[in-house]
Amino acid sequence: MGKDQIKQLIKTRTDRDGLTETGIKGVRLFRATQAIPCVPAVYEPCVVAIVSGAKEAILDGHRHVYDDRQYLCCPMSMPVKAGTPAASMNNPLYGVFVSLDHRVMAELALEMDNAGAALPPRRGALRAQGIRLASWDAAFSDALLRLLQLGANPTDTAVLGDARLRELYYAILQGEAGMFARQAFGAGNAIARSIAHVSSHLDQPISIDDLASRAGMSRAVFHRKFKQVTTMAPIQFVKSMRLNNAAMKIAIGMTVSEAAMGVGYISPSQFSREFKRMYGQSPRQWRNDYQVTNGVA
């Protein structure tokens, strides 16, 4: 019943394809009534829940297709290709994007540990790779519905929004992807901190040796553990993050040179070569061919 109510809320509050703000920080509704091929995107820490239709995310060649039976949990910034290849007027996609606030998630994970719900001892870093699909459960469905119901009243949203969002975060940490998310937001996860550093410093030189040093690991150990978490070698991850961000910037109207400089490329020719190698077309061809999807990817 909860999913049907969530779907009805989204239908009544979205009058166009793309993203719609709810008034709650980090929570957006989305609708798609036409197929959108998988295109480069960067998922910042988030949960994506679908109540109608299906969505797709590809990370380093690994394809994740999910619908109203599973939600996507991405607790660390990840360069993906994402789209809605099956959406149509007769089969519209409705869903919710929920950004995961690092401070609140970390506080909740710590409180759960202190309350006796500590994670079992595990050697090494995260074992799940980048993103995970988790089954909807009653707690997640109820918390998401209670959160979205606030959107009808600005006063309720202002007063109760943070508390309801915290309730949803707790349901995520208790759910099927809970251990995965708790490890990512835990204070001891050096790989997650390295990924956050990369995500916030794309316009600056990034040294793998510096990342390894920040993580307190040798370069070889850092490389192995980083690949366990993301499926990618650190150098490949940094390049994917830069190029995906650049592709997104170009798609919304930024010039090729501005996009290249904005993600740390000094040489325009190097940027064009690596962009074409990654996506099969030059940045200018990409700009001419790509249709802005208003963030539904």
Image (spheres, helix red, strand yellow):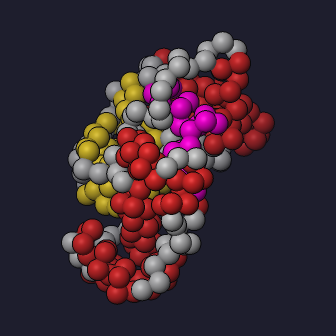
Percent position (x, y) of residue 279?
Answer: 26, 69
Q: Is residue 230 above or below residue 41?
A: above
Percent position (x, y) of residue 21?
Answer: 57, 51
Q: Would you identify the image quadrant in which residue 253 lies? A: bottom left
129 vs 47, nearest the viewer: 129
State the quadrant of the N terminus.
top left
In the picture provided, is 204 more to the left or to the right than 222? right
Q: Residue 36 magenta-drawn?
A: no
In the picture provided, is 44 more to the left or to the right than 86? right
Q: Residue 193 magenta-drawn?
A: yes
Q: Is residue 72 above or below residue 206?
A: above
- Residue occupying the point 24% across, 50% down: 61
16 vs 127, nearest the viewer: 127
Q: Is residue 239 visible?
A: yes
- Residue occupying the point 50% across, 80% down: 261
Percent position (x, y) of residue 192?
Answer: 53, 44
Percent position (x, y) of residue 137?
Answer: 45, 19
Q: Would you identify the image quadrant in which residue 201 lies? A: bottom right
- Residue occupying the point 65% across, 47% down: 25
- Residue occupying the point 68% across, 27% down: 110
Q: Main secondary structure of the magenta part?
A: helix
Q: Would you identify the image quadrant in which residue 92 lies? A: top left
Q: Is residue 40 above or below residue 150?
A: below
The magenta segment = 177-198
Q: Is residue 5 visible?
A: no
State the quadrant of the C terminus.
bottom left
